Amino acid sequence: MDNLPLNHTKWNDRLTFDVALTLEGSGETLQEIMARHSITANDILTFNADPIFLKKVEHYRTEVRDKGLTFKLKARAQAEELLTTSWLLIHDGAVSPAVKADLIKSTVKWAGLEPKDTGPQEQNGGGVKITINLGNDPRDARTIEATTEIEDATAIEH
């Protein structure tokens, strides 16, 4: 297994953002973008045939047109680029485990993958909650809650 971030295309979100700014008349020239991203005119033609690239550019153009070029949009584009740096740090053997754990926790948080806090836990152990809908009316639903305790658990041998 390699430790490199997934790169399915030669373009990234920062490039689509820069192209959108140029098309909206508020960014660098196309030649400046090509030099900074180390791409050729042929690359641009290839990207222009990629529907995902075009959709991403149009999304950023709409953001710039409708909401103006905001700090939040710039920060979002920068944060997406910094994910690559985070990935490399997480997989670098010289980086301390504490830093790696912090980066992983942050990435999970930014992605919205943290467990949702649904309020206080009613019970610390396991348990089963079954809801049976007996009709279209929510008042017809019945909830059955049960807890089980295992008193004599023996190991299963293979």
Image: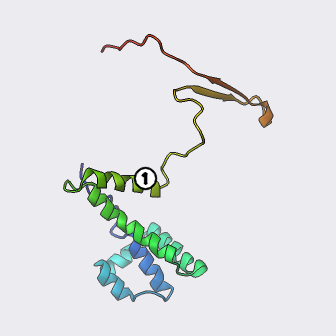
Q: Position of residue 134 (x, y in %)?
A: 76, 28
Residue annotated with mark 1: 108
Left or right relative to 100: residue 63? right
Q: How is the image coloured?
A: rainbow
Q: Residue at x 64, y 27 (%)?
A: 130
On the image, which quarter does residue 7 sit in?
bottom left
Q: Residue at x 51, y 27 (%)?
A: 125
What's under tag 1, amino acid-wise? Val
Q: Position of residue 18 (x, y in %)?
A: 42, 79
As displayed, is residue 56 above or below residue 147?
A: below
Position of the C terminus, as image quadrant, is top left
Q: Residue at x 54, y 79 (%)?
A: 64
Observer-nearest of 102 and 41: 102
Q: Residue at x 43, y 80 (%)?
A: 19
Q: Position of residue 119 (x, y in %)?
A: 60, 42
Left or right relative to 83: residue 95? left
As displayed, is residue 114 above or below residue 18?
A: above
